[in-house]
Amino acid sequence: MNRRFLLAAETFNYSFNKYADKVEIGAERFTRLMPKDIDILEKADNEKWSLRRLSKALNVDPENAEILRRSYYRAKDIIDAPTPAESFRRAVRHSIRYALSEGLKKETDIEKLVGQICYRAADLSYLLDLKNQKLSDYSEEFRKIPTESDLFDRI
């Protein structure tokens, strides 16, 4: 899959493997409609569109346009990471932040987060396959503990 499809998968909360399967069979929603929305979101981001303009272009109400815009920004952060390892790290970080915002009060909440991290691992596997790389290629990068300045440099 190319960057556009990866952005669509991440923006619309699909695992990369599942999205790739849909692209492979030519499903219009995955090959044309969602990527078209990504094109709109990317243009809106580059040109700093108002929420009203974005809402109209996406043909959704402003509340949903804002949700899609935030989801696209998150997707862009993950997909445009410099390495698959950093993409994984960012994806897990976003999953944890989301889980914390929803609350981790019950064992089932923790299991949902574990499931999300497992999906992130599967997405990492997909990215590594795309680059014909293996997990051990990033062993040192995974063991690096980011400093606060590393984290804030990205924000």
Image (tube, rainbow, N blue to C red):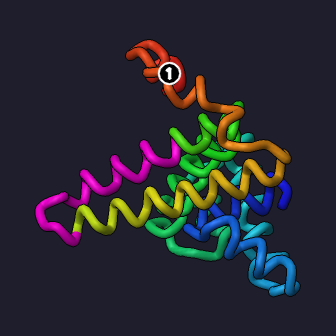
Which residue type carries mark 1?
Lys
Q: Is residue 35 left or right of residue 151?
A: right
Question: Of residues 80 and 140, which is closer to you in this image?
Answer: 140
Instruction: Name the quadrant of the N terminus.
Output: bottom right
In the image, which residues are magenta? 90-108
Q: Residues within 10 Å of mark 1 (few under 14, many from 20)?
A: few
Q: Is residue 128 magenta?
A: no
Question: Of residues 32 and 126, which is closer to you in this image?
Answer: 126
Position in image of residue 142 (x %, y %): 54, 31
The secondary structure making up most of the magenta span is helix
Q: Is residue 67 left or right of residue 47?
A: left
Residue at image coords 79%, 43%: 133
Question: Of residues 42 and 98, which is closer to you in this image?
Answer: 98
Position in image of residue 55 (x %, y %): 59, 66
Residue at image coords 18%, 58%: 104
Q: Is residue 99 magenta?
A: yes
Residue located beneath label 1 in the image: 144
Image quadrant assignment for residue 107: bottom left
Is residue 59 positioned above or below 133 on the image? below
Residue at image coords 41%, 15%: 147
Position in image of residue 153 (x %, y %): 51, 18
Image quadrant assignment for residue 25: bottom right
Question: Of residues 107 and 13, which is closer to you in this image?
Answer: 107
Q: Is residue 133 left or right of residue 141?
A: right
Image quadrant assignment for residue 58: bottom right
Residue at image coords 51%, 39%: 89
Judged from the image, the secondary structure of the residue bearing numbered disc 1 is: loop
- Can residue 153 be seen? yes
Position in image of residue 76 (x %, y %): 64, 45
